Amino acid sequence: MPSPALAPAAGDRWALFLDIDGTLLEHHKDPTGVVVDDELRTLLSNLDRQLGGAVAVISGRSLASIDTLFQPMVLRAGGLFGIELRLSPDEPAVAAEEPPALAALADRAEAELGRAPNIVIERKGPVLAIHTGPHPQSLDHITRLAKAALPGLPDGYRVVEGNVGVELLPAAALKGDAVYRFMTVEPFKGRRPIFIGDDVPDEHAFESVHALGGISVKVGRPEQATAALHALADVAAVRAWLGDPQFPLLDKLVRREVTEAAEEAAR
Ligand SMILES: O=P(O)(O)OC[C@H]1O[C@H](O[C@H]2O[C@H](CO)[C@@H](O)[C@H](O)[C@H]2O)[C@H](O)[C@@H](O)[C@@H]1O
Ligand SMILES: [Mg+2]
């Protein structure tokens, strides 16, 4: 039997927010190499029907990249960590622009690092990603380079070191803010949010769903500090949970022990 704290309250209506890479899709060394299978499309359509449309992906990918991946589906989405919002599927995808100072940095990064093995540079308008793959040494080096570039960028830019790369993000790129924005509009309004994510930028969204009385689910990396209160082992476990006829039965999630130190480290 689920403990009372883990059982969905009667009458709860849910809103579902999903990270993409590492949550719905397994990683691939090339960001353009991932493929959305029809099983995932069917899963998302079923959830969309089940939750009255209160389903959105919130990703570091641009809306254009999300659309290319999921076509012909057009999802409610927060692209570029929430900078590019599509609150309803009939809104066109508008791409955010690359500021000149970031363009200059991206040009330099492409010239200096573009040929290095395992490094992939992804220009996404106001966000620049330098993917290293799971190679800690190059990750340290690239993080230092990215931090050194901050003074030349518009105010508020920050470096986020993720599991397999570094991203330079403007101040407005906060996944939790995207969750808040969705929660102000139909069909999300008044529901209880669930956010599922696997990486550092997802921590902000975990905090937001907590503030909204929702459920946070961290995927994989059990050794990593996180604010999330629940866990799923991997992409397969995420898909199995989402596809369970009893979704969202919370006792199928692993309840995380969150220590003060872990919460602090996740901030
Ligand atoms: O917020 P997410 O949906 O998880 O997106 C985060 C980034 O995902 C992609 O990069 C990562 O996945 C790639 C494909 O597996 C991999 O090649 C890369 O090394 C990873 O960093 C995407 O390309 C980025 O734009 C997203 O920000
Ligand atoms: Mg992810």
Image: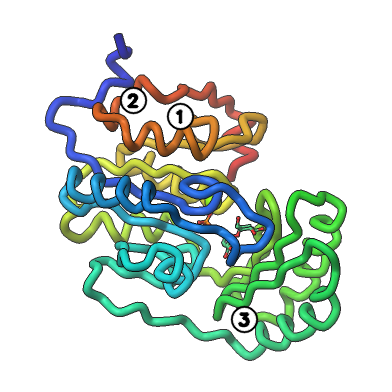
Q: Secondary structure at mark 3?
A: loop
- Whichever of labels 2 and 3 marks the residue nearer the N terminus, that label is 3
Q: Amino acid at mark 1?
A: His
Q: Amino acid at mark 2?
A: Leu
- Whichever of labels 1 and 3 marks the residue nearer the N terminus, that label is 3
Q: Secondary structure at mark 2?
A: helix
In the visual, does 51 lie left or right of 117?
left
Find disc 1 in the rendering and name its residue: 230
Tags 2 and 1 touching, CB below 8 Å: yes
Residue with the most extreme bottom position: 100
Which is in the foreground here, disc 2 or disc 3?
2
Ligand 2 has an atom within 8 Å of the beta carbon of the residue at disc 1:
no
Residue lying at 66% horizontally and 82% vertically, measured from the top left: 102
On the image, the x and y values in percent for residue 217 come to 45, 36
Residue lying at 35% horizontally and 78% vertically, measured from the top left: 93
Find disc 3 in the rendering and name its residue: 154
Q: In the figure, residue 176 lies in which quadrant?
A: bottom left
Q: Residues within 10 Å of mark 2 (few under 14, many from 20)?
A: some
Find disc 2 in the rendering and name its residue: 250
